[in-house]
Image (spheres, rainbow, N blue to C red):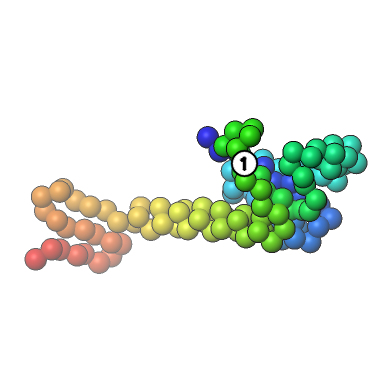
Amino acid sequence: MKTNLLLFSEFSNSCKQLSPMLGKINITKLCIDNPKVRKHILSNKQYNITIVPTLLIFNNVFDYKKYEGSDASRIIKDMYYNITQNEASKKSHNKIKVNQPDDFTMERESEKVTQP
């Protein structure tokens, strides 16, 4: 299972733009505004974090992809778009009612569609 980790700052305009989307995305967020957290992140040479937002997508500890700045923002926006499109698609599918399989009749709100 993949783990998504977003490193962000509340002082970054790019991160502020992403903030409204983050509630819908399955992502772990780590704010680097705390000086101790920031020092630890900057001293970790394995991940080499130098800019926010930074998105790390882990398959495991050693297998990960790193996206920084506008690339991270684009991926977050794509994730959000995909989730909202799936939700919209589910809502529209729930409006279609299919009667018994052998009668091939579908009702969509007030209109009735029958296969000839």
**Residue displayed at 79% across by 61% down:** 13
- Name the residue type under label 1: Tyr
Q: From the viewer's perspective, is 35 left or right of 81?
A: right
Q: Decide if residue 14 is in sight here.
A: yes
Badge 1 local density, few (<14 within 10 Å), some, or many (20+)? some
Q: Is residue 19 visible?
A: no
Q: Mark 1 points at which residue?
A: 64
Q: In the shown orientation, is residue 91 left or right of residue 100?
A: right
Seen at 84% across and 43% down, the residue is: 42
Q: What element carries label 1?
A: strand
Residue furthest out toward the top: 61
Q: Is residue 116 left or right of residue 37?
A: left
Query: Of 42 and 95, which appears nearest the observer?
Result: 42
Horizontal relation, residue 66 to residue 96: left or right = right
User: Percent from the top left, x then y, of residue 18?
Assistant: 69, 57
Picture residue at 50% right of the left edge, 56% below the top: 82
Which of 34/87 is in front?
A: 34
Residue 12 position, x and y percent, is 81, 57
